[in-house]
Image (cartoon, rainbow, N blue to C red):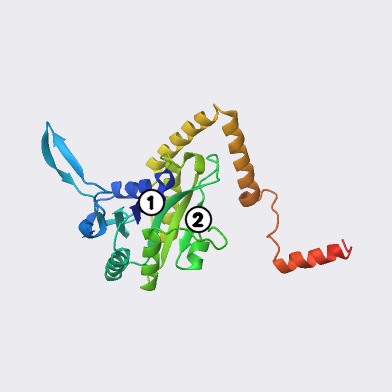
Amino acid sequence: MHLEGWVDAGLGGTTALAALLEANDTEPVATFDGEELLDMRARRPILHIENGQHRGLTWREISMALGTDGAGNDVLFLAGPEPDFRWRAFCAEVTELCVELGVRLAVGLGAFPAPAPHTRAVRLAATASDESLAAGIGFVPGSIQVPAGIQAALEQSLAAAGIPAIGLWARVPHYVAGLPYPAASVALLAGLASTAGLTVDTTALQGAADLAIQRVDALISNSTEHQEMVRKLEHQLDTTEGNPLQLGEIPSGDEIAAELERFLRGEG
């Protein structure tokens, strides 16, 4: 699932879901009433005009469709704009459908700006209804409070109905977050494949990702200031997450306290 309207740096989630839909012959399962859920002044329909004559309107809608992955496994796709209204009712309707259709896992796709260089592989962070699900991908440690998107509400509603739910978030270099960044979508689809046990072809997207990175390289090469920024980001990532010196795990608070006490006593 990816519903447009919340954080999606580099269009990571949007492009990933679009690639899945383009690779599938999907069958509509449900559409949700836009009159009840969407602010039409904020999400105006598209008017088609040909030689001055109205040819109809295209209305934004939220829909669920049935397709398959590369191995023939059934997959449901929830796509469209994030609702403006009636979040609880919408989540209840989606959850009821998922229970009825036997969904075994819900996966949300998104991306956020991060202090990461484009010269390194895109890393994912997870939010999940179960800690073991998030641990398989990785997560941002510590306690944080952030504004929530509809995906978070869906994750909680689905989990309450007994359906495990996980959100996959690509960490997009902050300096390209406003541009299409297909490498984020490739990482999201790889995470989807490993988390849900699906077969997903990312060949076409990988080609677009390589081309986009080449263009960023060309832009960065024209500025010594930007080159230095990228070097600092590389160093930060390599020393904090890459652990190039193969240091051991960070000691516990008790171990640090004991070491400090020994130091203060002059024992080493």
Q: Which mark is residue 136?
A: none
Query: Viewer-proximal residue, 204 or 87?
Result: 87
Residue type at mark 2? Ala
Estimate the x, y position of residue 248 in percent, counting from the top left. Answer: 70, 58
Say what amino acid the circle numbered 1 marks. Answer: Val
Q: Are marks 2 and 1 in contact (CB under 8 Å)?
A: no
Q: What residue is at 41 percent from the left and 37 percent from the top? A: 208
First in sequence, mark 2 or 1: give its number. 2
Q: Does residue 101 appear anywhere in the picture? A: no
On the rendered structure, is 121 left or right of 265?
Answer: left
Question: Where residue 26 sits: x, y (%)?
Answer: 24, 53
Return the residue nearer the eye: 207 or 118: 118
Mark 2 neighbour density, 10 Å: few (under 14) some (14–19) many (20 or more): many
Residue at left offset 29%, top offset 46%? 22
State the image coordinates of residue 108 (x, y, percent, origin top left).
Answer: 39, 57
Distance, label 2 to label 1, CA atoms, is: 20 Å
The residue indicated by pointer 2 is 125
What's the residue at 49%, 33% (across, down)? 216
Which quarter of the figure has residue 120? Answer: top right
The answer to whether residue 237 of the structure is visible from this angle is yes
Whether 205 is drawn above or below 105: the answer is: above
Q: Which residue is mark 1?
A: 200
Left or right, 160 with reference to 268: left
